[in-house]
Image: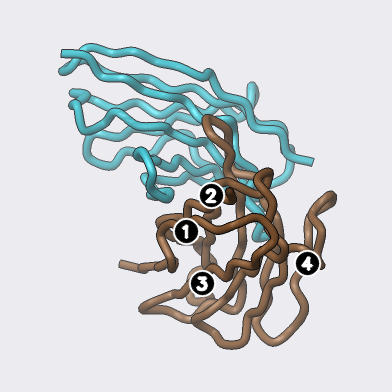
Chain colours: A cyan, B brown
Amino acid sequence: GEDVEQSLFLSVREGDSSVINCTYTDSSSTYLYWYKQEPGAGLQLLTYIFSNMDMKQDQRLTVLLNKKDKHLSLRIADTQTGDSAIYFCAERPSNDYKLSFGAGTTVTVRA
Amino acid sequence: GAVVSQHPSWVICKSGTSVKIECRSLDFQATTMFWYRQFPKQSLMLMATSNEGSKATYEQGVEKDKFLINHASLTLSTLTVTSAHPEDSSFYICSARDQANNEQFFGPGTRLTVL
């Protein structure tokens, strides 16, 4: 089964880069997702990467995948106050529809 | 983009009553929808997979007679919490799988408070 782990908290100064880390355990081909959840709201898909890729960049977001260590990271460049939220890493095997979520990383952006 | 709505966004009910939560895919068809529960400061826990035109598949430990799921159309799934108790108070989130690309899109969630 899948087991997704994340660090729980991250505090970053406005304008700096944020890096959120995640590890996963599924060894088969898999999709890896990053979601953002603001207080009292649902989940917003930020980006995703397939396990045969090393990196994906989308504007301020960069996803890096280390397949050997099963380590995934999300880098947010020029972090803004609106980036304060909980960020969830999730995994989905390519042969299934179920998502397995990490515990979420609470990112706090300070002025 | 793909939009999923939930109704109501929040509900307060008395212990022992039943509450129905709707999940709708607004601009795409979803043969599969998922229901999650999220307790404060915790992650999402999958409760059940809702399949259009067939019975839902429940995760281990989730009582199917307490959490009734109906997926009668390609754009609507409902979750009914029967005989609700205070421990059922939680944030319930649905997601819908777009059958065109297999991606899941999440609703905004429903906050249930049982007094």
Distance CA(mark 3)–CA(mark 4): 18 Å
Q: Earlier in the sequence, mark 1 or mark 3?
A: 1
Distance CA(mark 1)–CA(mark 3): 12 Å
Q: Residue at x 44, y 75 (%)?
A: B25
Protein chain holding label 1:
B
Q: Are marks 3 and 2 in contact (CB under 8 Å)?
A: no
Question: In the structure shown, which secondary structural element does the residue marked by tag 4 occupy?
Answer: strand
Q: Earlier in the sequence, mark 3 or mark 2?
A: 3
Protein chain holding label 4:
B
Three-letter residue code for mark 1 = Val
Q: Position of residue A77 (x, y in %)?
A: 23, 25
The residue under label 3 is B22
Q: Nearer the viewer, residue B37 or A18?
A: B37
The residue under label 4 is B57
Distance CA(mark 1)–CA(mark 2): 6 Å
Instruction: Answer with the quarter of the image where residue A6 lies.
Output: top right
Question: In the structure shown, which secondary structural element does the residue marked by tag 2 occupy?
Answer: strand
